Image: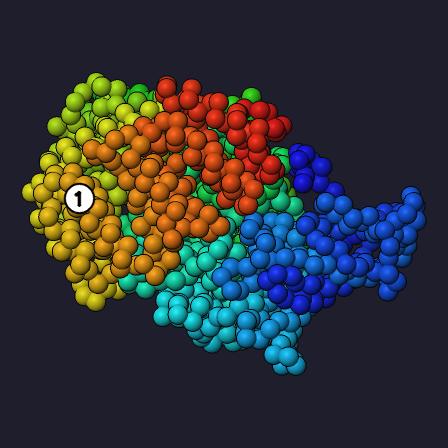
Amino acid sequence: MTEHLIRREDYRPPQWSVREVWLSFTLDEETTEVRARLHCLRGEGVSEEEPIVLDAEELELVSVALDGEPLSPQSGPGGRGFVHDDVSLRLHGARAPEAWVETVVRIHPARNTALSGLYRSGTGLFTQCEAQGFRRITPFPDRPDVMARFHVTLEADEARYPVLLSNGNLQETVRLPGGRHRAVWVDPFPKPSYLFALVAADLQAIEREVGLADGRRSLLQVWVKPEHLPRAGWALASLEAALRWDERRFGRVLDLDRYMIVAVSDFNMGAMENKGLNIFNTKYVLASPETATDADYAAVQAVVGHEYFHNWTGNRITCRDWFQLTLKEGLTVFREQEFSADELAQAVGPERADSARAVKRIEDVQTLRTAQFPEDEGPMAHPIRPQSYRAIDNFYTATVYEKGAEVIRLLHTLLGEKGFRAGMDRYFERYDGQAVTCEDFVAAMAEANGVDLTPFLRWYEQAGTPRLVVEEDWDGDAGRYTLHLRQFTPPTPGQPENGPVILPVRLGLLGADGRDLPLVLADERDAVPAPEAPPAGGMRPIAPRDSAVGATTRLFTLTDEALTLEFIGLPPGPKPVPSLLRGFSAPVRLVFEEPDEALRHRMAYDSDAFNRWDAAQSWAQRQVLRLTRGETETLDETFVTAWKQLLADESLDAMFRVKAAALPGERWLLETMTPADPVRLRTALVRSSIDLARAGRDLWPRWRDCGSARPYRYDPLEAGRRALAAFAWRMEALLGEDERCSRTFAAADNLTERLAALDAALAHPDEALGEALLSAFESRYAEDDLVLDKWFARQAMRWSWHGAPGAVLARVQRLTEHRAFRWTNPNKVYALVLNFFANNLAEACAAGDPAWAFWQEAVLRLDATNPIVGSRLARALERWRRWAEPYRAAFAPVLEATRRQVRSTEVREILDRMADEEVVAP
Ligand code: B3K
Ligand code: ZN
């Protein structure tokens, strides 16, 4: 296996590429035979001596032929023949510029526990090829810049595998003697091998034929196990919504006659955008009121959208090499976020659209802060376009995805919706059908807007979260307010010095009455904005300010280290309160000494809903951290009053209020605590929650019954009401008062409320109440694999109230023996084991050595069976160096011991980095 470092600067175009490929599968879970015929082309200027190098991993080679002649293993240097090793098949002796290669190999899907390549799930066969799974199916130049047209023949036993699917259009199906059948699929679009897919299984589809914006028609299908058909409707509706949205917002029309989504239970991640044949984790397809929560419905819609949007951003235009991954992922996450926001806004109507969008923005920023910010400060820190890697699968990260999306959002902010759209149009026009780089994307944006975006590229080169340091001056007599903005990015592994990035800061100033003040800079006094000079042949530089003189929210952009803004004409008297980074206009950490009083003011008045939420969160964070340091025993009166006021403000969206009132997430709080002490933090959180529950006591009865109307329907407004009710239930339970959880649990007609009742019970100091509902939940969903994951997750994330240290760990370990738990099913491992370490570190630390031993055992087990899942579990503890003692010292030797035993490149790369072994340049 490739143990060495792969560097971006070493990129070379392929020596040989493949124009067309014919694949023929004789499918069986024990042994599948794969015949391939490749039409290969030698690259320009490539010498005749150059062998045809095909990637090949874990393939049993049966035969090889070159230009119609069988080929034997090469006997001596220079002659005709092939060389087959662990990673490749090299063919020597092709002299002409074109060559025909034929191979026959055998593979063993049932033994493929890594779930990469062709594997078995249940009784069916499925593929996952991104990033490098295709080489585990057949010898091929398995790199995204080799794009070929695929012809695929699938043959199998008809009773066992009644449905045979692959990419593109179904050419023919044939019944064969002996109960076998065959299907032939041809994909009209050349594609890289990572987008290949096949499915052979006992599935059924729901489908809908839709008209497309260009007048064509297309068949949309969602394939699931027959018993899951009643849960497939939402995914199909989401697919159609995504298709419409891409037509409307980006002018992109579906290019296929048939678009299929297939659900599979064993899958390493969320879903995969294979051309015309998306394969999905069942978690992101199946939804019914009884088996999916409001959050699940939203997630299905988002992931269906995400994979659909890849058809243009990823498939039609793909990545030149895997370093460019964010080219398709960052951009597609951005599109997915906008899709979700637009759908939410549409569902709630124009009056509430802004707050619905703010809620979505809050969720995205929470994800960024919880998952990406820590990554950026830790041993895995890398730029959105990494410079090197050992295992590309380790780089499907929050940085590439979520920070990548923020970087795209920066372009959207700088260029505006119209300019951004023009850039996208240019990108599609210019690069359709090609494998390109991040520079190509930024160049299309630059050209379409006449703006020089060269300095922007630093966002692709530098790791680390930039800090925005803010100082202010106030001249109360003159009504002059000065903001000094300065940025720096702390060093990250391999990058000791970082430079300034293009940093847009959207801001406002709040007056003493809470109203926004008009923003005029000193040099704009005469308010005649100079007309923008047309780009004289060249490109305009990025403007440091917008032209909206006098507006109450304005955009200023740091193009260098520092920027000073002098606002004039403000009402004399008390200092205005700045509202910085409105809508989170850049993915940075703000360094600003904001007094409690300013937070209170913004929490009450900030016209920017995102910042209003952020003010509430910052203040809560400050409060909890004071408790962890033992500086106080209780929360501040003033905070509690402000908190209660915001929560009770009926003029605000319910979901927004819940988000603002919830205490900041534990993972984020741990990041802000030095050293990070999960146990102290947990204690402080419990105390704060109970304080707040007590303070809001009179509110809870108001909302307790405002759950859903019957029957349940997924709808964002209803979801908000349910969230508020759930909040009230949990608060009352915390006070030991809610005896109603069991009734609510039994009466609910939907999973959202049933789980909320369970969560309330688990927050109740009487642990028997939680136990009773856990067991009711288990019996109710005994046969429902997917819903049981939520049951596993709750036990993994449980806070022990009175239990001995180690009780939660012991329960988690016991649950690995549960009949529904399988180490070979990623969803189970994520729900139970990953959740415990990633989201319940306090219990892991409290348990001490046995917890680390369990982590080691699990990592080593997965290292041997499924390295992608193993890496994810290993990474759950990657911030261990920040932990307080004695946790840190106890974990260090366990990490070392584990590192000595791992075998897979994936897990080893992670553990080496965690141990601070320098494995990368940057
Ligand atoms: N492109 C896939 C991820 C593939 C992960 C490979 N280890 C899903 C997505 O981002 O849409
Ligand atoms: Zn993606």
The residue at the point 21 percent across, 46 percent down is 771
Residue 18 horizontal/vertical position (percent): 75, 58
In front of the other: 313 or 902: 902
Residue 676: tell me if it is visible: yes
Residue 218 horizontal/vertical position (percent): 52, 74
The residue at the point 31 percent across, 50 percent down is 791
The residue at the point 32 percent across, 58 percent down is 782
Cβ at disc 1 under 8 Å from ligand 1: no
Where the N terminus falls, by quadrant?
top right
Residue 872 horizontal/vertical position (percent): 48, 40
Quadrant for residue 830, please give it.
top left
Above or below, 720 against 241 in this view is: above
Q: Horizontally, is 698 left or right of 552 in the view?
A: left
The residue at the point 70 percent across, 59 percent down is 106
Q: Report the number of discs.
A: 1
Q: Callout 1: helix, strand or loop? A: helix
Residue 693 horizontal/vertical position (percent): 14, 38
In front of the other: 468 or 786: 786
Where the C terminus falls, by quadrant?
top right
Question: What residue is disc 1 on?
Answer: 768
What is the image's colouring? rainbow
Structural crowding at the residue carrying mark 1, measured as other residues with C-alpha within 10 Å and reported as few (<14), some (14–19) or many (≥20): few
Which amino acid is tagged 1?
A: Ala
Residue 275: tell me if it is visible: no
Above or below, 363 against 896 in this view is: below
Q: Horizontally, is 736 left or right of 222 in the view?
A: left
Above or below, 576 against 336 in this view is: above
Q: Residue furthest left?
A: 698
